[in-house]
Amino acid sequence: QKEVEQNSGPLSVPEGAIASLNCTYSDRGSQSFFWYRQYSGKSPELIMFIYSNGDKEDGRFTAQLNKASQYVSLLIRDSQPSDSATYLCAVNLFSGGYNKLIFGAGTRLAVHP
Amino acid sequence: EAGVTQFPSHSVIEKGQTVTLRCDPISGHDNLYWYRRVMGKEIKFLLHFVKESKQDESGMPNNRFLAERTGGTYSTLKVQPAELEDSGVYFCASSSRTSGIYNEQFFGPGTRLTVL
């Protein structure tokens, strides 16, 4: 079992719809979770992070965390073609007093006009 | 504020040669990380510096890889000798926080390494 799992996609949604990206993780002790967006050939760009159960909203983006189910998701409202990218879920592994990110393989999102 | 920068953006070398990648973190960030993405796989952690000290090298694949951060500013990652399986994109990230859950890491554009 991979430590962080994401559906590779592509997830295709029409412009203006809600895109829902999902991620599960195996380490029950994980405390913080990050969503990165990566356009082809570019650097991963931090969109949001979440560490408490529930929802966290930032503009058109909402991150959701359910630690009991070991599940984190990202909702993108009013999807735009410019949102088309690969979305990476990352879990912060805190070990020995220091942090490192464990990434999923990413979900490719395609928003079509 | 400048972001994380990496050099070169691309490198094509032959098996057995040596390559050195460079990363300049965001100014003032003590924490510097190296990650790697090989074709079709997820981004994987290589190592973590706090200032000039290596805190976690658990992701380094083997002793052909050597990372340094003299002076606690920029870092280099040397691969010597390079093998075919070393091909991939090498990312550098930096963070202002060493520990705790608010560990926002900011990534550079990566160096695409191709070993022929």
Image (cartoon, coloured by chain):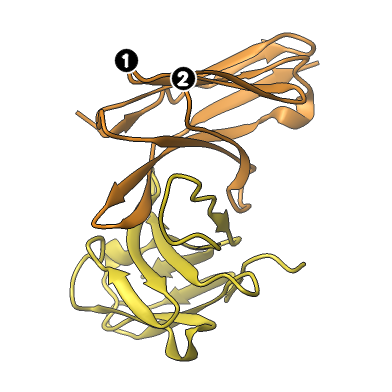
Q: What quarter of the picture does the N terminus of chain B occupy?
A: bottom right
Chain bearing tag 1 is: A
Position of residue B55 measured from the top left corner of the image (x, y, whole percent): 30, 70
Question: How far is mark 1 from mark 2, CA to CA?
Answer: 9 Å
- Tag 2 secondary structure: loop
Position of residue B7 measured from the top left corner of the image (x, y, whole percent): 58, 76
| Residue displayed at 73% across by 8% down | A17
Seen in the picture, residue A9 relative to A42 is either above or below; the reply is above
Q: Earlier in the sequence, mark 1 or mark 2?
A: 2
Q: Residues within 10 Å of mark 2 (few under 14, many from 20)?
A: some
Residue found at the very far bottom of the displayed protein = B71
Position of residue B103 measured from the top left corner of the image (x, y, whole percent): 49, 50
Front position in the image: A44 or B69: B69
| Residue displayed at 62% across by 67% down | B4
Which residue corresponds to mark 1? Answer: A68
Which residue corresponds to mark 2? Answer: A53
- Tag 1 secondary structure: loop
Chain in orange (letter): A
Q: Is residue A85 visible?
A: yes
B8 on left or right of A112 = left
Front position in the image: A20 or A29: A29
Disc 1 residue type?
Ala
Disc 2 residue type?
Asn
Which quadrant of the view contains residue A79? top right
- Is there CB contact under 8 Å for labels 1 and 2? yes
Chain bearing tag 2 is: A
Q: Is residue B41 visible?
A: no
Chain in yellow (letter): B
Q: What quarter of the picture does the C terminus of chain B occupy?
A: bottom left
